[in-house]
Structures are given as C-alpha cells and as structure tokens.
Image: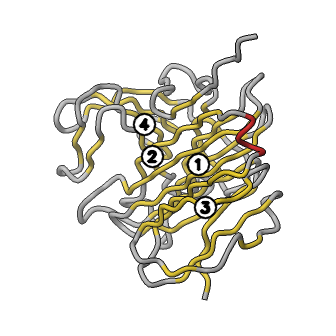
C-alpha cells in the first residue's frame, strides 16, 4: 500500500485575505498569552510607499492588531524605508491598548493530521532603523507557553522544535508591545512552517535542532519536557560563543519538547 504524502503548512503560502480562518491558520489577537483568540475581521489592501499593495487583516480599519502579507514578488517599502517587506513576507503587530495586547497567528492540526511535526519559525523586528522599538515573541502550544523572548529594537530570534500533535491541537505565535509597553515600533516579520515527519522518526534516537538568539559569553542549558510543565536538562550547560545558537543534539525525541534557557 502506498504511503500517504506528508503534509506541510506555511504561514505565507497558505495566507488568505478573503477567509479567516484560512485552512489551518487563524489570525487574531489575545488579551493574554493563554487567553481566548479573537479573530481579525477587517480586510483591506494597503499601498506601501513604493506602490506595492499589501494584504492587511485588522481588528478594525486602521486599528491594530494586524496580520499582513505581501502577495507580490516585489519588495514593499514604508516608514521612510525602514520597513522592508519582501515578496511573500508576513508580519504582525500587537494592539495599541489593552485588551488587544498581542497580535496572534494560530496553527490548528486538521482532521487526519495527527503526528509529529517539525516546526521552524524565525522572527525579526519589522523596522530596521531608528524607528524600531522593542517587542516580544511567544510560542504557545495548547495553552502552555513553550518559548518566550523579549527583543530589543532591530533584533531577531527563532524557535525550532519537533512537536507531537493531535487533531485539534493549537500552536499560537504571539507578538507583544515589549518591555516598555508601547506599540510604537513594535512588530515582527515572521516565517513559520510545519512539516509532518515520518512517525518512525518520533521514536528513534535522532537529533533535535534548536535555534535561538542569545548573548555571547552567557551560559545556557538545553532542557526537555514531556508535559511542558516539568523541564529537565539534557546535558551540561554551555557558554554561547556567538549571538545565535544553532545546535543539533543527539536525543530520543519521542513525545518531547525542547527549549534553551539562560542559567547563572
């Protein structure tokens, strides 16, 4: 019997301005990290400074939060050239005030889609000059935060992990206003993809790849968890030699989650 092809889902490729949810993806806002997702329901095309039209899903016309995508192959420029949105690029921003504290993009496992997935995500501040503000990025799986990082202006980070997911499980990507609580300059460009992997890989001794922005000279620890509550080290702590850790670790990945944390 032929094996069914493995599924993949991409936040840019699957985006639709006309429907929300759009397949496995939903776009909205949350008042807190673990709260209810409220869908964005205002749709429009926004013309950027160089004439490129970008798809915007907003809380209301002209009001944040917003999730947006450049549907063209041309780069869109705005904010005196400090906002650069490549063709196919996706961004999201938080709201100006409570309760619309976090812009949110949600992935929901579809019917027949249970199994292990490789999640690869990368984000960067949506402005690259002096207008850039601080912001924060979070990944929440079934109401449990598995990754969180405050980003200073003009910075980037990412989260990559293998997740064992059941039908109806949710993974939320959230953007906030940063440590200063101001929405000015707060927002992220995001790349996110889920790729279903062979079930055999989920029970074999294999490698897990974890990518995270860190501070050079600080000490970090790779931890794992079966329930996202109790975390245990997978090995000794290590000192970061560069500002990005991209490491593969030999581990048994069956049903486990992974994160990198800073330690004293």
Residue 253 rendering spot, x and y as whole percentages? 72, 52
Q: What crowding class fits label 1: few (fewer than 14 Cα within 10 Å), some (14-19), or many (20 or more)?
A: many
The residue at which mark 2 appears reads as: 190
Earlier sequence position, callout 1 versus callout 2: 1
Earlier sequence position, callout 3 versus callout 2: 2
Residue 70 rendering spot, x and y as whole percentages? 34, 32
Q: What crowding class fits label 4: few (fewer than 14 Cα within 10 Å), some (14-19), or many (20 or more)?
A: many
The residue at which mark 1 appears reads as: 173
Q: CA distance from mark 3 to mark 2?
A: 25 Å
Task: Tell me which residue sits at (41%, 59%) in the image.
Answer: 186
Q: CA distance from mark 4 to mark 3?
A: 35 Å
Between disc 1 and disc 4, the foreground one is: 1
The residue at which mark 4 appears reads as: 68
The residue at which mark 3 appears reads as: 249
> Can you say whether 54 is above or below 85 in the image?
above
Tell me if 80 is positioned left or right of 219 in this view: left
Earlier sequence position, callout 1 versus callout 3: 1
């Amino acid at each position: 019997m032929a094996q069914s092809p493995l599924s993949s889902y991409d936040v840019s490729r699957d985006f639709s301005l006309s429907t929300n949810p759009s397949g496995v993806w939903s776009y909205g806002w949350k008042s807190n990290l673990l709260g209810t997702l409220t869908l964005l329901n205002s749709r429009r095309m926004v013309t950027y400074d160089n004439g490129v039209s970008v798809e915007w899903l907003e809380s209301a016309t002209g009001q944040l939060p917003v999730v947006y995508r450049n549907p063209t192959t041309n780069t869109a420029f705005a904010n005196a050239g400090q906002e650069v949105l490549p063709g196919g690029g996706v961004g999201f921003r938080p709201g100006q005030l409570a309760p619309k504290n976090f812009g949110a993009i949600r992935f929901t496992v579809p019917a027949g889609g249970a199994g292990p997935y490789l999640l690869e995500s990368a984000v960067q501040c949506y402005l690259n000059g002096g207008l850039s503000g601080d912001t924060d990025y979070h990944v929440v799986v079934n109401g449990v935060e598995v990754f969180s990082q405050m980003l200073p202006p003009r910075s980037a980070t990412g989260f990559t992990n293998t997740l064992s997911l059941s039908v109806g499980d949710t993974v939320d990507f959230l953007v906030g206003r940063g440590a200063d609580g101001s929405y000015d300059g707060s927002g992220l460009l995001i790349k996110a993809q889920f790729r279903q992997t062979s079930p055999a890989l989920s029970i074999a001794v294999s490698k897990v790849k974890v990518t995270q922005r860190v501070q050079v000279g600080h000490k970090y620890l790779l931890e794992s968890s079966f329930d996202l509550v109790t975390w245990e080290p997978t090995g000794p702590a290590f000192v970061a030699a560069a500002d990005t850790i991209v490491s593969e670790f030999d581990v048994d990945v069956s049903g486990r989650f992974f994160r990198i944390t800073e330690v004293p």
